Image: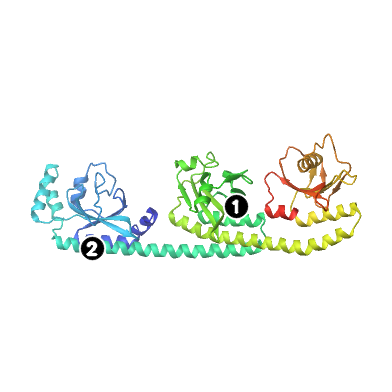
Amino acid sequence: MGIERAVLDSVFGGKAWRSSSDALFEATGLAMTVMDSTACSVVHSTIHCTYCQLTAAGRTSAPGACFDDPPRLSEEGVTLTSCRAGLPCHLVPIVIDGSVSATLFVGGYVSSTRDRKRLFERLLAKCVPESQARLAVREIPVMTRREIDGLVKLARVAATEILESARRHRRLAMRIQELEVFAAAGREFIEQRGMGPDLLEAVLERGMAIIKADSGSLMLVRPGTDLLEVVSPRGDAVRGARGETIRVGEGIAGRVAATGRSVLITGPADPMIEHSVYPDRGISTSISVPLVHADAIIGVMNLNSSDLGNVLRGEDLLQVEQYARFAASVIASERAYETTARWTYELVQLGGIANTLGASADIDEVMCLASSLLEKAFDFEIAGLVLTGWGRDHATVVLGRDSSSSDIDAVLAEATGRDTAREPFDPIRLVTHRGALVGDGGGVDWNVATSELVTNDSAVAVGCVFIAARGDEHFDADDRRLLD
């Protein structure tokens, strides 16, 4: 992986390199210019000789440019060519980690005094005054092939070492930043104990902070399915995304979950952006990384930026991947903790309640105990029990938050498959410890989980027990197993 342009500008525009290259020019007359890996643009240029300035007068090339057109670089080693002033020059690739990161131009010399005469005549042909032309060509050093090869090698070693040093310092700075992020995230996650929305939001916010993202989403695989569900969206670009699902293999996030490979998208013109969930919301740069724990993909983290100036690099992707592995471990640990807590609850609490229910012969008391159990075991908005056997046809409804009569009717209809407008339950007993009955409501899509109540021989259904939440919340396999 090459070194980014911002690093090149910082290194070769710095005082240390400028002092070295200027000293070489003063001592030998050689000019050194650092260009990008393709030798198409100048990163840093030393002072050029008078001859170069005279021949370049009136040209439209960029200041400091050594060529009118980009040169053709040799695939291996040093390229020997001529600059736009007609002087021989060497183009040296600066290789870091097996990749060309920059190109070093060394030139501004001649091999013999005969070459000086040819250059003098060239200046006269350009109507340069004779005295000025003589002075200009005298400044051009005469060097043997051995001398120039030695100086080129020296310059190459110096440029490589300064880039290597900059890379080491950058990696160290990134590692320190990474440790700071992980330490802060660890403290926050410990405080957010429990697999709730606060923890998931904290995981996403810390990820967004790494690359200064202004939007993002955390998607988890629903247990037992091939669905990725948005469990925590943040930012205008993904507003309203909570609860949305895609199948593994579909879309950008789905492909990340299917392959286990991260995706870095840069630039608003990238065709992958056009196929994202929200192509019209100004996302210009995006990173999608898998959440992997114990060799299993449990979700995907998507981080987006609408700032065209926020250019993400390979190093940013590596840092986000490191964080994603840490975040996946946290989420998996919290899931395991939650599952263990539920099993403990089932073994200890449900056993005691079962004994109480078994000892009671009063149906109303059983319904009251069962509704109390629902409040303790689940997070819901509306829950309850419906009894349609033994000569009864009534419902006990527990409100987990403020709800209206139309909300209750909609949930009962969904849970029982019954037209409650034509066949209402009578009576309906309301439990309002956590929520109250309000006037407005209706028009809400409900997610309802139900389990039938059957007699001991499992031959006759006498009702059902249910839990319900609004459309952007879902019950997982553990919820349904505990309900059964």
User: SS for tag 2?
Assistant: helix
At horizontal 80% and vertical 40% (from top left) the residue drawn is: 409
Position of 31 compared to 113: left or right? right
Measure how far apart labels 1 and 2 are at the Cα level: 54 Å
Give the residue type at disc 2.
Answer: Lys
Q: Is residue 309 among what the camera can see?
A: no
Q: Percent position (x, y) of residue 70? A: 26, 46
Position of 305 compared to 47: left or right? right
User: SS for tag 1?
Assistant: strand
Give the residue type at disc 1.
Answer: Leu
Around disc 1, counting alpha carbons within 10 Å, would you say few (fewer than 14), some (14 to 19), or many (20 or more)?
many
Q: Percent position (x, y) of residue 148? A: 18, 60
- The quadrant in which the N terminus is found is bottom left
Indicate the quadrant where residue 181 lies: bottom right
Q: Which residue matches tag 2?
A: 153
Q: Which residue matches tag 1?
A: 220
Q: Give the number of the disc on residue 46.
A: none
Foreground: disc 1 or disc 2: 1
Please tell me whether residue 152 is drawn above or below residue 311 in the rendered image.
Answer: below
The residue closer to the viewer here, 62 or 132, is 62
Q: Percent position (x, y) of residue 142? A: 13, 58
